Image: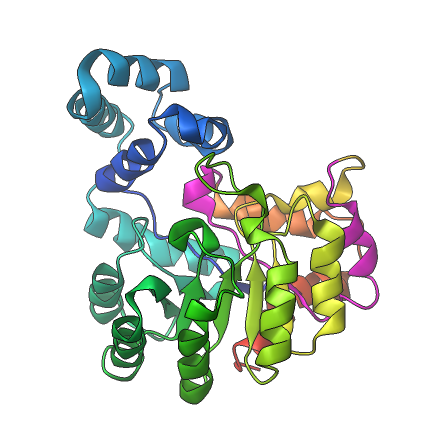
Amino acid sequence: MSNRVIDMRLDFPLDKFGYNYLVDLWDNDDNFGYQDFFLKRCCSNIGLSVPEVLNTFKSGGKDAVRDLVFKAADKAGVGTFDEEMNKFFPELDSIGVEYGVVTTVDRDNDRTVEILNKYGKDRMMGICFADCRKGMDAVRQLEYDVKERGLGCLYVSAYRNGLPADDRRNYPLFAKACELDIPVFIYSCMNYDNNLPMMIGHPSHIDQVARDFPDMRIMASVSGWPWVGEMMALGMRHKNVYVNLEVYEYKQLGINGSGFEMYREYVKGRLRKKLTFASMAATQGIPLKELIQQVLDLPLDDGIKEDILYNNAARFLRRD
């Protein structure tokens, strides 16, 4: 089979700033679930443990944590962002990744634009994050970022904005995305932030959006777990909705009891042309090559694996 890959959530490599940002995100008990989900693996990559980081935070605050992480990253050989990026594209070439949808670890549109301008846009589509709570300012910013600065898609996150996808405050952004003819990524998953309702990312919120904007290309991201059945229904119910497992490991499709088994079964039939590969490898603390291999190891026909890794994303992004 072909080894061509399009990564629908391609992380830039983490430099020392990136590691510090991830640590900063999960330094309080309201987000304790994220400490176990992300922080453990990212810290282990630079020789730290979660208790070590959290104890340092309790005794010395964020400045002490930053010092700890910088020293650990230095010891682990983590370079500057430019140094890490110089290794990035040769690595992508070696594992067959032709194209990726990208943003910075802190979801900063300005930095994403700077990186795209410096390293080229031929292999990357930049994400525009927009906050619908800013009203028409957000709509104007989206149009400017796409038309003038070259970002290629919109990401709407209930986790970051605190509003479900079908909240009417998102609709001006969706209308502008349709006018600009750009794809829209929408967060759809349980969150671990106890300051937010668990149901805020339920897939049913995307169902209403897909009905109201049938011409908009929608990527329902972050797997839908634990509402996997509803996520499957989205992809089967709407021609314009695709799905991915952004920030979850694809090997879970092959594990009975993981909650992801339904993906494995439906991707053999009605979901075959809808499931795409999205890694967020750096955020997960897992090598991108390993996450791709997880797809290759699934008990599925080679043609289905090619659809997951490349064909479906190429169709969604209009690169086929």
Task: Judge from the rendering whether residue 219 lies leftward or rightward of residue 179; answer left or right.
Answer: right
Residue drawn at point x = 69 percent, y = 58 percent = 231
Quadrant of residue 307 within the rendered picture: bottom right
- State the residue in front, 87 or 315: 315
Residue drawn at point x = 32 percent, y = 76 percent = 139
Q: Which residues are magenta?
A: 258-286
Quadrant of residue 30 within the rendered picture: top left
Rendering coords of residue 121 (x, y %): 32, 73
- State the residue in front, 15 or 39: 39
Rendering coords of residue 313 (x, y %): 58, 70
Quadrant showing the N terminus: bottom right
Rendering coords of residue 41 (x, y %): 46, 29
Task: Judge from the rendering whether residue 315 lies leftward or rightward of residue 123; answer left or right.
Answer: right
Residue drawn at point x = 40 percent, y = 32 percent = 42
Q: Residue furthest front?
A: 168
Task: Judge from the rendering whether residue 221 lies leftward or rightward of residue 121; answer left or right.
Answer: right
| Rendered view: 107 above or below 145 | above
| Rendered view: 308 above or below 60 | below
Q: Is residue 2 visible?
A: no
